[in-house]
Image (tube, grey):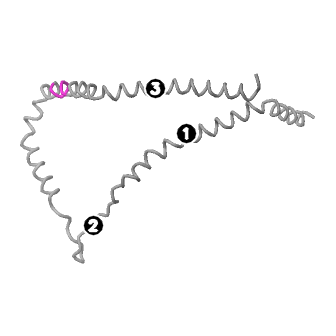
C-alpha cells in the first residue's frame, strides 16, 4: 500500500476513534442534562430534610434569640434603605458599573475559548500527517544529527 494512502487511513481511523469516544461523552452529558431537574429535586428534598431536622434540634436557640434578631433585622433594613451621606461639597457618591454584555460579546466569551483546543488539535493533526508521510527522511535527519554529536 502506498505511504500517503496508509497515512490517510491511519489518520481517519484515529479521528474515527476520537469521534466515537466524543460521541459517547456527549451522549452521557446530554443524559445528565436531561435528568438535571430530577437530580435538583432530589437534592432539594434532601436539603429540606436536613434543614427540618436541624430546625427541630436547635429550635431552642431561635426561640431565645427572637427578640434580639428582630431588632437586628430592623436596624439593617434601615441602613440598607438609606442613601449614603453627601460629601462636603454636597455631591452624592456614585458607583460606576460596566454595561451588560451584548449578545455577540457574550457569544464570543463562550465560543472563543472552545475554539482554541480545536485549533491546537488541527495543528497537531497536520504535523502528524507530515511526520507520517516523511518518516524515513526525518529518521535519516535525526540519525545525522545524533551522529554529529557522537563524532
The range drawn in magenta is 48-52
- Mark 3 or 1, nearer chain start: 3
Quadrant housing the C terminus: top right
Depth check: 7 or 64 in front? 7
Residue 71: image location, x then y, percent? 9, 48
Separation of disc 2 and disc 3 at Cα? Answer: 49 Å
Q: Is 51 included in the stretch rendered in magenta? A: yes
Badge 1: few (under 14), some or many (20 or more) residues near its Cα, within 10 Å? Answer: few
Q: Which residue is mark 3?
A: 25
How many residues crowd around disc 3 within 10 Å: few (fewer than 14), some, or many (20 or more)? few
Query: Which numbered circle lies on residue 94?
Result: 2
Query: Closer to the camera, 145 or 19?
Result: 19
Outermost residue on the bottom side: it is 89
Q: Magenta-highlighted stretch: main secondary structure? A: helix
Q: Is residue 47 magenta?
A: no
Distance in Å between CA atoms under marks 3 and 1: 17 Å
Instruction: Say few, some or many: other residues with alpha carbon within 10 Å of mark 2 (under 14 / 14 to 19 / 20 or more).
Output: few
| Front position among marks 2 and 3 | 3
Amino acid at each position: 500500500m502506498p505511504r500517503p494512502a496508509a497515512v490517510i487511513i491511519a489518520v481517519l481511523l484515529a479521528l474515527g476513534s476520537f469521534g466515537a469516544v466524543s460521541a459517547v461523552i456527549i451522549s452521557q452529558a446530554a443524559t445528565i442534562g436531561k435528568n438535571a431537574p430530577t437530580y435538583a429535586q432530589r437534592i432539594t428534598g434532601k436539603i429540606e430534610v436536613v434543614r427540618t431536622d436541624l430546625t427541630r434540634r436547635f429550635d431552642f436557640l431561635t426561640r431565645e434569640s427572637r427578640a434580639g434578631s428582630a431588632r437586628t433585622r430592623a436596624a439593617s433594613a434601615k441602613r440598607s434603605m438609606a442613601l449614603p451621606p453627601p460629601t462636603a461639597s454636597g455631591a452624592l457618591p456614585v458607583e460606576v458599573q460596566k454595561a451588560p454584555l451584548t449578545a455577540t460579546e457574550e457569544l464570543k466569551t463562550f465560543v472563543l475559548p472552545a475554539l482554541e483546543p480545536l485549533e491546537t488539535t488541527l495543528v497537531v493533526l497536520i504535523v502528524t500527517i507530515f511526520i507520517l508521510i516523511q518518516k524515513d527522511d526525518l529518521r535519516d535527519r535525526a540519525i545525522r544529527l545524533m551522529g554529529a554529536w557522537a563524532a
